[in-house]
Amino acid sequence: GIGGTGLIKIKGNVYNTWGDGSGDIKDNKTIINLYNESSNISNGNIYGSYSSGNNNIIDNTIEIKRGYFELNIYGVYSEKDAKVERNQVIYNTASTIGNIYGGYSSGDNFVSTNKVYLQTGSVRGDIYGGYSNGNNQIYSNEVNITKTSVIGNIYGGYTNGENQIKSNIVSLNGANII
């Protein structure tokens, strides 16, 4: 993970795991905890797990405990035809200007049971449980927001392709949506 009480400034992308072949990317955890109020990550994106191949991306977690971010946060990101299943983003006491994606796919396969939990903080961007630019089945993805301020749109599941979308959930509890 990335964290500490000293000053941390990162300009560029942050990746925990990367795959470009065909083996599964599975059971990885990323923790980002920026204690220093002047610390930030900008000019890039955060990827819990990333695949530029046909790697299935399953059961991965990224946890943002605190910090300031000027970028998009992806639980997982798939460029090709990989299953994107059971991944999660846990976001707590942080502030971001950018979008948050539980599971993101540009290829043709399943985007299912990915979750985004926003537990406190603020987001100036859109939030997606599951997102697809390909021809995927988008189902059972979830966004759960508690005590968080959001300036943007919230989607349990979202597609730009010819997809089947079903059983996606957005839950709000004490959220301030603008």
Image: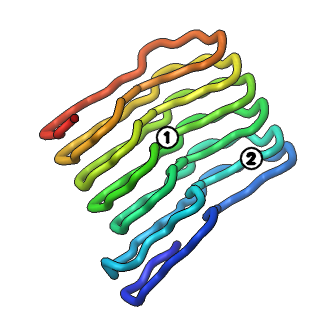
Please tell me which residue is depicted at 38% across the width and 52% down the height of the picture: 90
Instruction: Compute the Cα span from label 2 to label 1.
Output: 14 Å
Q: Is residue 73 left or right of residue 152?
A: right
Tell me residue 64's x, y (percent): 40, 61
- Give the vertical position of 96 relative to 80 (above or below): below
The one nearer the camera, 168 or 93, is: 93
Q: Tag 1: residue type?
A: Gly
Q: Secondary structure at mark 2?
A: strand
- Marks 1 and 2: in contact by CB < 8 Å? no
Please tell me which residue is depicted at 78% across the width and 34% down the height of the picture: 80
Please tell me which residue is depicted at 81% across the width and 38% down the height of the picture: 54
Q: Secondary structure at mark 1?
A: strand
Q: Quadrant of residue 143?
A: top left
Q: Quadrant of residue 18?
A: bottom right
Judging by the rendered image, the residue that carries numbered circle 2 is 51
Q: Is residue 89 left or right of residue 92?
A: right
Tell me residue 145's x, y (percent): 26, 40
